Amino acid sequence: MSDIFGTPRPRSAPRPPDGRRRVLVPTLVTLAVLLFLGSIFTSVWTDRLWFKSVGYSGVFQSVLTTRILLFLVMGLIFGLFVVANLYIAYRTRPDSVPVRRDDPAYRYRLALTPILRPVLIVVGIILTAFAGSVAASHWDTYKMWRNSTSFGVKDPQFHKDVSFYVFDYPWFRFVTSFSFAMIVITVLAVVFVNYVYGGIRISGRGPKLTRAAQVHLSVLVGLGVLLRAVSYYLDRFGLAIGSGKLIDGITYTDANARIPSKNILIYVAILCAILFFASIFVRSWALPAMSLGLLGIASILIGAIWPAVMQGFQVNPSEPDKEGKYIARNITATREAYDVADVEVESYSANTTLTPAQLAASAESRVSTRLLDPTLISPAFEQLQQVRGYYAVPTTLDVDRYKLGDDAQPQDIIIAARELDLSGLQSSQRNWANDHTVYTHGYGVIAARGNQRGPNGEPVFVERDIPPVGELKTTTPPRIYFGEQSPTYSIVGGPKGAKPIEVDIPRGGASGGDDKANATQNTYDGKGGVPIGGIFNKALYAFKFAEPKIVLSSRVNSNSKILYDREPRKRVEKVAPWLTVDGDSYPAVVNGRVVWIVDGYTTSNSYPNSEHRSLKEATADTLTEGESQAALPTDEVNYMRNSVKAVVDAYDGTVKLYQWDTKDPVLKTWMKVFPDVVEPKTAISQDLLEHLRYPVDLFKVQRDVLQRYHVTEEQTFYEDGERWKVPEDPAAPGTSTALQPPYYLSTAVPGEDTPKFSVTSVYLPNSRQNLAAFVSVNSEATDTENFGKMKILQLPSETQIQGPSQIANAFQTDKGVSQALLQYQQSKTASILYGNLLTLPVGNGLLYVQPVYIRRSAVEGSYPVLQFVIASFGGDVGFGTTLDEALRVALGLEEGSTPDDTESPTTPTTPGTAKSASQLLADASTYYEQAQDALKKGDLATYQKRINQMADSLEAAKKAIDAPAK
C-alpha cells in the first residue's frame, strides 16, 4: 500500500492470536451469568425460607407457581409463534433469487445463512424470556380473573356487574395487547426474512411479493386486524373506567358518539380481516389494501372527528343539561367506591353566643381533649424514658385508648415502642458482632395520658421504665425484636446452656459507659426467624447481605436464627402482596403482649364511573412530608376498602391477617386465591378489638374525595361553587404549605352524650380561609353499629367561623397570649412550639384548642414541655396552664367563680367612658401591675384578664384624647 504521497508502506506482520483474550472474555461472560443466576436463586430461596418461618409458605408457593406457569405458557406461546412463522417464511422462500452484490439483502443472506439455526434459537429464547417476564408480572391480574366475585352492582351503561370491570376487563385487555404485540413483532420479523431470502423484492415500481409471502402476511395481518376488532369491543368498556376533563367515566359524548363509533369500527375491522383472509384465494392485494384504508379513514372520521364535533357543537353549548345524567352516575359511583355513600351531612349553626354556663357544661360533658401533641413530645419520651442512648422512639408517636384502673371509660393515650437505634451507640461499640449479635432488640412501650400534664409540663406516664411499670398490663417480656426501627438483620439464638450475649435489661451505670457491663443478657427463644445454622443457609445469607462474617463467625451456631424484614408494614406487604398497607402502623399491648397493628386496603382502578385519585397525593400532609409517616405509593385508584386488620407480634414476628370488611368482593376474591390466609372477623379477640381504629390513610383519601363529592345534586356539582379544600397546617414548620393532618381524639358530635374515639378534620371553602365544615369518623371498633360512621357538620355559608390559619393567627397576636409568651420570644435560651390545633364541636359551636410547648435551646437533653393551653370559642381567646383555665379566661370568668345560667352571652368588657383620659391611663397602669403580679404567681387567668383590661383602657383613653371638645 502507499500513503497519499505515493510512498510505499511496509506491511506489518500479522499479530499472533491472543490466547488470553480468547479465554478471558468467555470466562467473564460465564462468571456474569453465574452471578446473575446465583442472585436470582439466592433471592428466591431465601424468600422461601422467610415465608416458611412466618407460616405463609402457601402464599410463596402460589405466587411463584403462578408466575412460573405464566412465564412458561405465555412466553412459549409468544416465542414459538414468532419462531414458527420465521421458519415458515424461510421454508417458503423462492428457490432462486437474483444475485446483485450491491443488494443489502444479499449481504444479509450471506451472513445469516450459516448461523440461521442458532439465530432462531437465540431469538426464540430472548422473545420467550421477555414475553414471559411481562406475563409473569401480571400474576395478580390473572388470579383475580380466575377467582372473581360478584359485586351485586351493575353499571348503568352496559348493565354488567362491576366485577367484570374490576376482575375480567384488566385480564382481557392484557391478553389482547399481548397478542397484538406478538402479531406486530411476527409481521416485522417475517417481512425481514422474506426480504433477505427473496420473498419480497424491492424494485423501481415498489415491492414485489411471492405468492407464499403474500399468503403468509395476509393471514398475519388479518389476525392483527381481527385483534383490533376485539380491542374496539373492549374500548367501549374502557370508557367507563377512563379519566375525563369534567368527570371520570362515561359522558354524554361517550354514550352517543364514541360507543356507537366503536361498534361500527368493530364491524369494519371484521370485514377488513375477512378480506385479508380472502387474499389467500385471491391473488390481488387491492381489496385488503382498500379495506385497511377504509379502516384507517373510519377510525379518523367516526372514531375521532364525530365525537369531537358532537362535543364542540352539541355538548359544550348545553353541557350542564347534556351531562347531568352522567354527572349523577359519577357522583353515585364515586361515593360508593370510596365508601362515603352513607356519610351523614348535618347543618351546623355554630352558635357563637352561648352563656359561660352552657359552654362550660357542654365542654365538660362532651369533650375529652387530647392536649399532648404526638408530633412534638417524642423528645420528652426519649429524654425521660430512653434509659440508654441505643433506644429511641419515632419522631411522631401514636394515639390509642386504654381502660386504666377502675375507670371503665377508655382514655386517650400517647404510646410509642422503645426500639433499638444502633446510631445511638458510641463509635467504639460499632462493629459487626455488636451490631448484629449483641444489640438486637428494643424493650417495652412508653405511654402517657393524652389529656394531662405533669407539674412541670412533662407527660404523665402510665407505662414506663425497664422492666415495664404501669397500667397497661404487660404480662410477657415486651422485647421488641420486630419494629419500625429494627436493624437490617440480627442473628440470635444459641446452644442450650450457652452464655447469653444479647444486651437485654440495662442495669445502673452511666449511659455513656460500657452498656454491656451494666446490663443483663438474653438469648432469643421466640419462634420467629430463619434457621441459619447449616453451611448452606449461612452461605446464602452471606451472599444476600454481602457479609462473609455470617459464614466465618463462631457466633453463628447450629441454633442460630436470622431476623430480617422486621418492619411491620413490610412483613404484611410480603405475606399479603395484594394489599396496600397504611402508612401508620402503631404499637399496642394486647392480651399482655406488645404487637403492631397495621391496616390493609384492597384497591382497584377499574370501578366504573368512579373518580380516580392518586394515593400519594390524597394522603400527603405534614406527617408524610416530614417522613414521620410512610407515604402511600403513587397508584391511581378509584375504589378503596379497609378490608384487613393485620397484627404483627413484636417479639416473634408472627403475622396474622383478620377479615374486617366482610362485604368487600375484592377481599373475597383474594381469600379464594389464598384460602386460610385471612382469618374471619369473628377470630378477633375483644382485647384486640379495643385497640383497632379507623385507618388514617383511608380517612385522608375519603377526605380528599369529599372536598367535591359532598355535593350530590348534579347541577350544583357542575357549577362547582360548593367545593371545599383541606386547610394547610398552621403548625407546619417554616414556609411549608403541607396540609393539616387528621387528628385522633375523643369527642362527641351533636346527638351524642358520651365522647367517642374519633378521627377528625375540617374543611374550608375553596377560595377562603373561614371554616366550611367539620368532619369526624367514629373510630371505636367496639361500637360495632357506629364504627366507621362518618359525619359532616356543615356550617351555613353566611356564618363566618375562623379557619385554622385564621385562629392560629388570632392566638399568636392576642394581646394576653403575646404578653405571656413575650419573655420566651425574647429569650435566647428558649423557643416556643405550637402544637396541633384541634377543632371540636361544643355547644352548637366550635371550640379551638392548641397546646403551647416551651423548649430550652442550646441545652443538651432538652425537650419540649407543655406549659400553656390556648382556647377559643366565638372569637374570645383564653390562655392558661390547663384547658379549664384557658376556657375560664375565654368565658370571662374570674378564677374560682361559678358560671350562672342566667348570664348574658359573653361579650368583651368595655371600661366606662365617663372617666377622663388621665384616669383611663392610670387604670391601664394599674391593670399592667396587677398582670405582672399574677404572672409571677403563675396565675395566667388573672394575667390575661388584666392584660385585656389594660388594652381596653388604653383604647378608651385614645378615643377620649381624640374626641373633639364639646
Image (cartoon, rainbow, N blue to C red):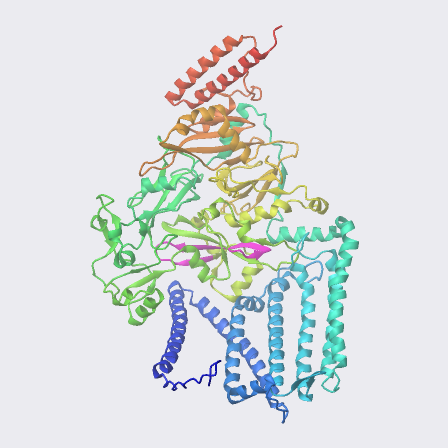
Q: Residue at x 50, y 8 (%)?
A: 919
Query: Does the magenta run of residues contain 170?
Result: no
Vertical comparison of 892 with 246: above or below: above
The part of the chain drawn in magenta is 633-657
Residues 912 and 16: in front is: 16
- Which picture quadrant has residue 498? bottom left
> Where in the figure is residue 831, as x and y percent of width and height?
40, 33
In the depicted structure, whether residue 637 falls above or below residue 377: below
- Please tell me whether the stretch drawn in magenta is mainly helix, strand or loop: strand
Residue 886, position in %: x, y? 47, 27
Can you see residue 217? yes
Compared with 241, 537 (above or below) is below
Relative to 50, is 661 above or below?
Answer: above
Q: Nearer the viewer, residue 69 or 925?
A: 925
Q: How many marks?
A: 0
Confirm whether residue 72 shows in the render: no
Quick check: is 647 in the magenta stretch? yes
Residue 121 point in image, percent of width and height: 51, 83
Q: Residue furthest top?
A: 966
Q: Quadrant of residue 727?
A: top right
Residue 144 horizontal/vertical position (percent)? 56, 66
854 horizontally vs 304: left or right: left
Residue 169, image quadrant = bottom right
**Which residue is most to the bottom?**
95
Q: What residue is drawn where x is 66% and y is 80%?
A: 220
Pick the quarter of the image with the C terminus.
Answer: top right
